[in-house]
Image (tube, helix red, strand yellow):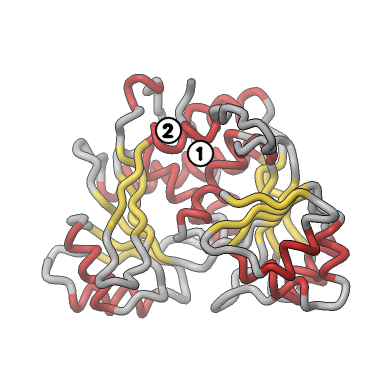
Amino acid sequence: MQTILETLQNQAQDEPERIYASYALSPDLSDGFRDVTVGEVLRAIDAFAWWLHNGWGRSEDFGTVAYIGPSDLRYAIFFFAAIKCGYKTLFISPLNSFEASKSILEATKCQRIFYAPPMGQIAKNLQCIATSDTLDVVQIGSLDECLAAESKPYPYEKTFEEAKWDPVVVIHTSGTTGLPKPMTMNFGFFSTTSEPVPPVPGYKDGSLKWFERRTFLGPFPPFHLGGVYTMMTIPVYFEATIVIPPAVPGAVSGKVLVDIMNQKKIEAMFCSTLPIEQVMQVPGGPDKLREMHFIAFAGAPLPPWVGDDLSKHTTVKTF
């Protein structure tokens, strides 16, 4: 067994030209998409890790650093680079109240907040209300700058046995019953997704292996656990390609998702239930979903009229 980072590094060496992600260049989909290879992703991670190292050093106790930005590939770059430097990343939802975010920052003893525009004001407001007077706020480079950076490898040589309990990311609960609670995940947690699920008679395979070598649409926000799965875990452990919608304020509309399906060959989709319901209400959307190899959802049940329709044409799974 390997950690997700060890797996990524091996893939970048063995198959550097494999497409890790394809992202919309702008909200105007006629501008097209950019494919990003595994090799490019690892170079961006290494360059970012050196930037972190040279600016703030390594953490020897898995210190917490936060990131908040638009929903793009920088979440994955930051996530892996922070791990290389010994940090765990706190993903803060921009939808949180300041009271909620303040509580999470304090509970995790966050040392600094990194941000990408247009999230600068949120980051600076959090700095102002923080009880710690040492909380730094730092802007990172654009996605183009991250992907264009050249770098020597940043060393990371821990084996799975050495690293399986290392904390790597902090997400938080929704806060529907009070202030959100931080949840810290380690390498071992994510490695379980790469293991087969024992078969259950009468049911289809319940593992994420369905994504293997497929191109899938993943509109989960990357600060959500579903986004960590779709942007960081599935493209690595299952050598899949995530198609990333344009980074726009708020949720991506069903129409935009259908427009993406019309431009890209999408074999699967993994998201919350609402985008599936929205796509079903857009002209041409139901046919696009019915053509997929499978559709996965999480967070809430599908409306019966959606599930009953799609399950007649494709495999519908919940994770």
> In the rendered image of this protein, does residue 215 appear above or below residue 2?
below
Q: Residues within 10 Å of mark 2 (few under 14, many from 20)?
A: some
Q: Quadrant of residue 200?
A: top right
Q: Residue at 56% of width from left, 55% of height from top?
A: 73
Q: Secondary structure under badge 1? A: loop
Q: Secondary structure under badge 2? A: loop
188 or 166: nearer the viewer: 188
Residue 24: percent from left, percent from top: 70, 64
Residue 80: percent from left, percent from top: 44, 42
Q: Residue at 29% of width from left, 50% of height from top?
A: 55
Q: Residue at 45% of width from left, 60% of height from top?
A: 223
Q: Quadrant of residue 284?
A: bottom right
Residue 290: percent from left, percent from top: 84, 58
98 or 8: nearer the viewer: 98
Q: Are marks 1 and 2 in contact (CB under 8 Å)?
A: yes
The residue at which mark 2 appears reads as: 154
Residue 79: percent from left, percent from top: 43, 48
Q: Please tell me whether mark 1 or mark 2 is closer to you in this view.
A: 2
User: At label 1, which amino acid type do we have?
Assistant: Ser
Left or right for 65, reference 242: left
Tell me the tag on residue 306: none
User: At label 2, which amino acid type do we have?
Assistant: Tyr
Left or right for 76, reference 29: left
Tell me the tag on residue 151: 1
Q: Residue at 85% of width from left, 62% of height from top?
A: 288
Disc 1/disc 2 C-alpha distance (Å): 8 Å
